[in-house]
Amino acid sequence: MALAGLTLMASIALLLYRAAPGAPAIIVAGFTGVTGLAALALAFTLDDAALFKFTSAVAAAAGIVVLCALVGPDARLGLASFASATFGVGLAVWLARTARARPKVSWPLIALFAVTLALLSAYAATLVLVSRDLMIADFMTYRGLAMMVARLADAGAWPVLLSAAVQSVTQDYSWAPALVPGFLLALTEPTSRAIYTFALLALYAAPAALALAILARDCARAAERPSAIPPPRPEAPRSGLEGRVGSHDHPSRRLLRRLLRMRLQLSLTPRNEAAKLALGVAAVLVAYPAAMAVAARGMPDVGGLVLFVCALKLAERLARLLGLRQGLNARVEPMTRRVALALALTVYAMFVFRRWYAFAGAGIVVMLALEVGSIALRKGARFRWRDAIIAAAIGALTLLALLSPVLVDWAPNFGAHEYANTYAGYRKAPDVFLRELGDWVGLIPALAALAGAMFLWTRSADTRLLRLTLGAAAVAGALFLRIQTPYIHHLDLIAPAIVVPIAASLILIFARAPRAALLGIAALGAITLSPLAAALTSSGLAPIAGLPRAPRADLDELKRLKDWVDERAKPDAKVCGLGSSYTFSGQLMSELWQLRPERSPSGSKLNVTMPDVDTVEGAPGAALKDCAIIIVGDPVQTHLDPDYQQTVIVPSREMLTGQGIGAKFRRTGEVFHLENGVSAIVFERVTPLDGADIAALQARWRAARAALGF
C-alpha cells in the first residue's frame, strides 16, 4: 500500500505538471501531500484483507491519473470526468448492494409523500397562476437545461447528452438536477412549464420536506425523556435475605424497565410514527415556505436538502461509531469504513447537484471534526484512534478521486476561481440584506426556531444530531457570506436550522398535547402563508416569499415587445438588449417566448444577451457587432452594485447619449413603457461596428473601472 501510495503521489504530481506547468508549488505540494499522507495512514492501519482491496484501487487510480497526464487537455478533461462518474456510480451501487439493512418504505410513508406532493402541486399552481410568473435568470437556467436534455433525448443523441452531463460537473451549472426532469419533458411536451414544475416538486420539493421532517423527528426522539415516567415505589423487603437478593434485580426495577420498553414500543408504532412525520412535514412547510415557493417558481435547489440531511445522518452515525468502546472490531471497523465512504460520496453529490452546497458539506466536515475531537479528548487512549484515521484517510482519498475533473479543469488557472473577488458585485448592504431576510424568513419564524433549538437543547440527553444540524448550517452560512450576499434559493443552506427546531419541538408537544401542537402549526401557517403575513411584513415580522406576488403591470407591453422583436430579428441582424434589472434586461428579452407558449423558444437565439457583471463576464465583447437593433433601458438598468456593472452602464450611456458606439445607431422612435417607470428605447444600426469600435469601447470600460479604483 505504501508503494501504491507513492506511485499515486508521483502520478498526481505529473498530472499537475502537465495540466498546469505554472501552478504554484504550494498547490502541487498540497494535493500530493494529502494523497500521500492518506495512503500512508491506510498502509499502517488497515487489516490485510481491506489493505489488498485498497491497494488495488489506488494502483488503478494511479494508472488513470498517468493516462490523464499523457493525453491532451480536452481528452484529459473528458477522461477524468468519465472516470470520476464511473467511480461515483460504482461506489453508490456497491454501497447499496452490500448494505445489511435495506431501506423499508411503508405504505403510510408513500401516502404521506402523495399527500405532500398533491398539496405542493396545488400550492405551485396557485402561486404561478396568481402571480402570472415569468421565469428569467437562474429560474430559467435549469428549465433551459431540461429542455436541452429533452431535445437531445428526442433526437437520440445519447453520446452527446452523456458527455455534456458528465463534463458539466466542472461548470457553475451542473446538468445533474435537469436530467430526470428533461427525460420527463422528452416523454411529454419539451416546453411545458406545468410538467417541468411537477417534476421538480415530485423529485426534489416533496422529498426535501420528508427528509427535513425525518431529521426533525430524530432530533425529537433524542429529546424524549423516558425517565419522566415516575418509577413505582419500591416495596420494603420482608427479610434481610430478600433485600440482599432483590438488590441485584428488584421487582420495581424490572417493572420500570418493562414500562420503559412499553413506552418506547408505543412511541414507535407505525401509526404514531406516521402521525409524527405528517406533523413534521406540515411544520416544515409552514416554518419556511420560501423553499417550496422557489421550487414552485422553477428552481430545483431545494432537492439538495435531501443530500444535506443524508450527510448529517451519516456524520452523526460516524461520530457514534467512533465513540463506541473498544472491542467488537470485526463489526465496527467495516461499518466505519462504509459510513466514511458513504459520507464522502454524499458530500460530493451535494457539490454536483448545486455548486454552493459545497459550503454545507464543509460545515458538516467541520462539525464532524469537532465532534470526533471532543470524543477523542474525553476518551484519550481508549478512543478508536485507528478507526478515526482510517475514516479520515478513506474520506479524503474518495473526495480527491471524485473531484479529479474539477482539479484537472481548474489547475491551469486557479486564480480564475477566486469566487470571493468574482462575486463581489453580488454583495449588498447589511440593511438591504436584513430586509430581504425579513421577506424570506421573517422575525417570528426565526425566533420560533431559536426558541425551539433552546427547548430541544435543554431536554435532550444526546444533542449530537442537533449540534451537527445547527453547527453545519451556521458554518455553511458564514462561508457563503464570505463570497456574496445570498439570494433566496441560497438560504437552503440554513433551512435545516430554521425548520428542524420548530418541527421537532412541535412533534414533542404533539406527543403530550396534540391540540396544542396543531394549534401551533395553524398559527405559524397564518403568519407565513396567509394575508396576515403581508400585513406584518412591513416590520419584518412575517415573510412574504411564500405568498403569490402581484403580477407585473407591464405584461401587455412585454407581449408587444415580444411580437415586435419576432418580426425584426434575423440570423444576420439580431436584436440585443442592454440592461440587467428584473424590469428590463437582455435575458428578459430572450425569455419572452413564455408569453406566447405556443411558440418555440428557439427564436430567442436571434437575440444577443449582453454581459452583466464585470468580474464574472468581463468587458462588452464582439457580440455587439451582430446587433442590428439594440434596445436600451432608460434609466440605465442594473440589479447589483453599479460599481461592478460597468459592462452594462458604459455602453448603455453611450447609446442613450449618442456618443461612442451610440454614434453608429439612431433612435427609431419606438419605445416600450415598462413597470417602475422604465422605458425600453429602440436603436437601429446605421453603420456597422468593427473591431476598432469594440476595442475603443473596452478601453473606455477599463477607464471607468479604473476611476472606481479597480
Image (cartoon, helix red, strand yellow):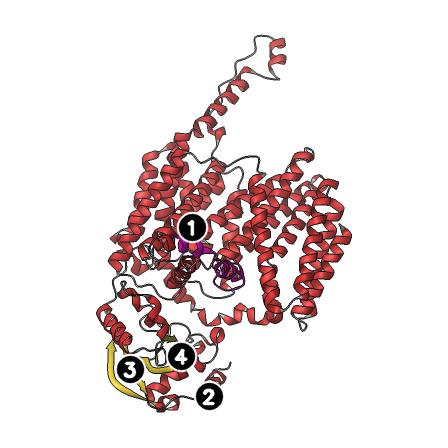
Mark 1 closeness class: few <14, some 14–19, many ≥20 residues within 10 Å: many
Q: Which residue is mark 3?
A: 682
Point out the tag, 2 or 1, that comes first from the N-terminus.
1
Which amino acid lies under the numbered mark 3 shown in the image of this protein?
Val
Residue 169 falls inside the magenta stretch: yes
Point out the tag, 3 or 4, that comes first from the N-terminus.
4
Which amino acid lies under the numbered mark 1 shown in the image of this protein?
Ile
Q: Is residue 383 left or right of residue 167?
A: right
Give the residues in magenta. 159-184
Mark 2 or mark 4, whichever is nearer to me: 2
Residue 24 falls inside the magenta stretch: no
Q: Nearer the viewer, residue 444 or 500?
A: 500
Percent across and percent down for residue 591 are 33, 68
Distance in Å between CA atoms under marks 2 and 1: 53 Å
Mark 4 closeness class: few <14, some 14–19, many ≥20 residues within 10 Å: many
Mark 2 or mark 1, whichever is nearer to me: 2
Which amino acid lies under the numbered mark 2 shown in the image of this protein?
Gly
Point out the tag, 2 or 4, that comes first from the N-terminus.
4
Mark 1 or mark 4, whichever is nearer to me: 4
Q: Are marks 2 and 1 in contact (CB under 8 Å)?
A: no
Magenta-colored segment: predominant secondary structure: helix
Query: Which element carries disc 4, helix, strand or loop?
Result: helix
Residue 92 numbered tag? none
Percent across and percent down for residue 367 are 57, 50
Residue 691 numbered tag? 2
Distance in Å between CA atoms under marks 3 and 2: 23 Å
Point out the tag, 3 or 2, that comes first from the N-terminus.
3
